[in-house]
Image: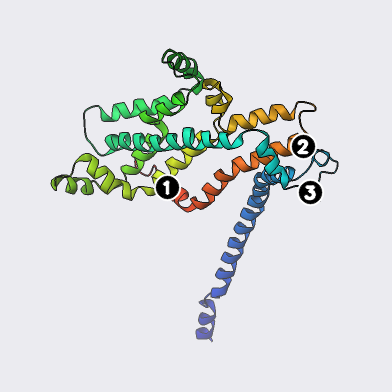
Amino acid sequence: MSTAASQQQVRPVPRHYGVGKRRLVDFSIEFIKYFVLIPLTFSFAFPLYWMVSSALKVDSQIFTVPPILVPIPAHPENFVNAWQILPFTRYAFNSVFLYTGPVVLFTLLSSTIVAYGFSRIRWPGRDTLFWVVVMTMMLPWAVTMVPLFITFKALGWLDTYRPLVVPALFGHPYMIFLLRQFFMTLPEELSDAARIDGASEFGILFLIILPLTKPALAVVALFRFLWAWNDYLGPLIYLRDEDRYPLALGIEILSRRANEIGNFSNGLPYLMAVSTIVALPVILTFFLAQRTFIEGISLTGVKG
């Protein structure tokens, strides 16, 4: 009897009891996560849906009670008509080839070279100067706006894209910081071996370092593309001729016309249609480069 009693006392707890409890905890965590994320996703996606939906309506369908979520009938011709009211093709050319494209290219080139000098080349005062560059990010753009305007006016650059594009040739502090942090995660032995073989610093940068930093470069390009593509205040300050306006200012002109009584009908649907077209490249760029973008964000800033 004593042997049977001792066997009953040391009987192990069934394994499925702990597994079931852990599964319940995991399920509860997943449920809470999706319970929070689904409403947040809806709150972010609904304004975008409302913009597209409004672009397919007419004026009489915009402000209704209750609101019309699905326009019946839809009016896809609003996109064509709205694009033809103003020279939006010209505005798109200005945005792509005169502003956003050069700014992205020049920022990538200049910020990469500066970040390489701060991370892979040893020279006196390197870290001190780097922190000086980082501290310039603390200066609000409103503080430097007036001095820059006076400088560019003295140079005769007003009503051109030079005040918006030329500064990109000197690097961007935030992009320099991102690239420098990424470069510092790469092994120093790669650069040292290339120097022993007689490679120049530019050869090391463009042939060895850059092929390994595509995620970080994608992040820099995407950030700079978003800032330049959506920039409104910069072109508003420096540009005067409407033929030189980018898309952001073109939308502002269309918005003013939409508020003028009797100028044209369907003002708000046309405004939403053009806004949808302008937002489409940003959305497509993010979805196409989403994996590279997230990888670059996760790897940047690992090492200080």
* Vertical position of residue 112 compared to residue 239: above or below: below
Question: On the rendered image, what quadrant is the C terminus found in?
Answer: top left
Residue 71 bears which disc, if any? 3
Give the SS element for disc 2.
Answer: loop
Spatial separation of the CA atoms under disc 3 and disc 1: 40 Å
Q: Quadrant of residue 184?
A: top left
**Residue at label 2?**
266
Question: On the rendered image, what quadrant is the N terminus found in?
Answer: bottom right
| Amino acid at dot 1 | Gly
Return the x and y of residue 31 as percentages of the image width and height: 64, 58
Return the x and y of residue 54 as percentages of the image width and height: 74, 42
Residue positioned 63% across, 51% down in the render: 37
Disc nearer the start of the sequence (2/3)? 3
- Horizontally, residue 73 falls left or right of residue 221, namely right
Foreground mark, 2 or 1, reads 2
**Residue at label 1?**
296
